[in-house]
Amino acid sequence: MNSRRVWAILRFVLTTLFLYFVWVLFTSDLGLFSLLFGLAASLLTASLTYHIFLPEHEANLRFFIPHLWALLRFLFLMVLSLYQSSFHVVKAIITGNTNPRIVHFRTHLRSDLARTVLADAITFTPGTMTLDLNDDHLTVHWLLCTTTHTKAAGEAVKTKLEHALGRTWL
Amino acid sequence: MIIREILALIAFLVGTFFGLFGMIGLFRFRDPYSRLHAGSLCGTTAVFSYLIALLLLAPSAAIGARVFIILVFFLISAPTGSSIVAKFIWESEDATTQRSSMKREDKSL
């Protein structure tokens, strides 16, 4: 049993558990038939899709299993900044003071999932929207721009999010 | 029971506020990125507030769990969708002309 095989089995089990959890949450029916049918369907779906759901190169459990407390903190931060940024945009709509620029910077997060979540989260921070994510290079459109310097722009846009995400995933 | 309904009403009002201003911004801004900002961000906040209100009004835990799942999926799908639209503007021919015109009339939206 080599390590590749162990990793494949582990990914299969994790995919099955996740699918079964969603099944139970959706049906919210604890009858025997529902539970057994859900398990069978989860096993079938997981056997077909585990290599897409968890790609093999994501070779660390911390790459996709979040630290629960950090995840909750991150979600709270996200909801807060969602309302904050909407408020900023509404203010920009009323007054008409915008300074749209496109800025580039890099992230040091390592897993695909964390990078994707960072790209999505940047859309929620005041007046920014991700245009492109290429490996670790982000292209961001900034509506209320204050600087075009790469390092300063990166500091302003993503530092807080990156810290919160670095605690959640690797 | 009545507190829940008042909180839901506040959430509905907040959602309507952001939705309305998002719509105004969609017509007020001139370049496609700023329009996308107004449309997607304010739209996301509006729908998010409505879903929070629905979560508050959910009659049972089972329905609440479903609304919660819709909420989580929406938080993933909405920024991804707007990001894809922005990426296609960024890559399209049109955007190059839009970008140069954006530089010229910088202060006038």
Image (spheres, rainbow, N blue to C red):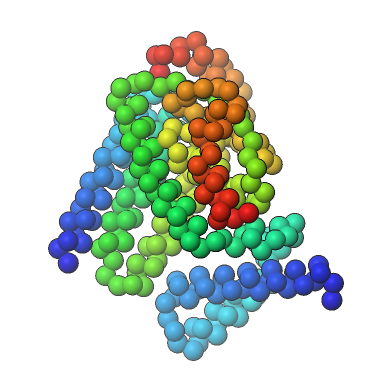
Quarter residue B94 falls in: top right
Instruction: Please provide percent x and percent y for residue B66.
Output: 40, 66
The residue depicted at 63 percent of the width and 54 percent of the height is: A170
The residue depicted at 55 percent of the width and 82 percent of the height is: A37
The answer to which of A84 and A40 lies nearer the viewer is A84
Residue furthest to the left: B2
Position of residue A145 relative to residue B70, above or below, is above
Instruction: Please provide percent x and percent y for residue B107.
Output: 41, 14
Instruction: Please provide percent x and percent y for residue A169.
Output: 59, 55
**Horizontal placement of A13 versus A101: left or right?**
right
- Residue B40 visible? The answer is no
The answer to which of A71 and B25 lies nearer the viewer is A71
Residue furthest to the top: B104
Q: In which quarter of the image is the N terminus of chain A?
A: bottom right
The residue depicted at 50 percent of the width and 10 percent of the height is: B104
Quarter residue B53 falls in: bottom left
**Horizontal placement of A58 versus B30: left or right?**
right
Position of residue A126 relative to residue A41, above or below, is above
- Residue A105 visible? The answer is yes
**Horizontal placement of B73 versus B42: left or right?**
right
Position of residue B68 relative to residue B16, above or below, is below
The residue depicted at 53 percent of the width and 19 percent of the height is: B98
Instruction: Please provide percent x and percent y for residue B51.
Output: 33, 55
